[in-house]
Image (spheres, grey):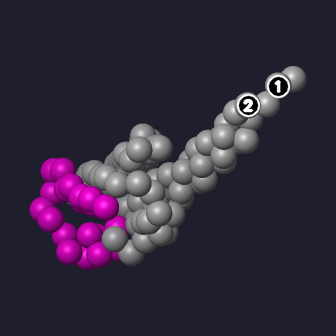
Amino acid sequence: MHKRIVFRGVEHSDLIEEYANQQLKKIEHFLENERTPVYIDVIIEPSKLRQHSRVELKVKSANYDLVSEYEFEGVAFYDVLDRVIDVMYRRLHEEKQKNVDNRKMVGRHE
């Protein structure tokens, strides 16, 4: 599994990276049985001047190619990161269920 955390417009922060890694554990756990290669990219753009943060999360594997992003003014950066990860986790579950349903329908006739 290839994971990359990118900081745009700000200096690298060990504290933010550690928090992002901690929050990404549930997505990594979900994808641990996925065929390789699996890529997880997190693009972090916190604002220095005002509370206007943007986070983008991309997951790419053999079965999934999803993007989740969120940008909102007036919300703490950690809340934005949590929201993006929760939305991606929910979308991964939905896509997995669609794949399972599609496999069940193969070969059935009406």
The residue at the point 73 percent across, 41 percent down is 104
Question: Three-letter amino acid code at disc 1?
Answer: His
Name the side, left or right, on which 110 lies relative to 56: right
Name the side, left or right, on which 101 lies relative to 42: right
The residue at the point 35 percent across, 68 percent down is 20
Front one among 33 and 24:
33
**Mark 2, residues whose alpha carbon is within 10 Å: few (<14), some, or many (≥20)?**
few
Magenta stretch, residue numbers:
1-20
5 drawn magenta: yes
Q: Position of residue 60 (x, y in %)?
A: 37, 46
Front one among 45 and 47:
45
The residue carrying mark 2 is: 107
Give the label on residue 81, or none.
Answer: none
Q: Position of residue 35 (x, y in %)?
A: 41, 54
The residue carrying mark 1 is: 109
Tell me the quarter of the image containing the C terminus. top right
**Residue 16 at least partly seen:** yes
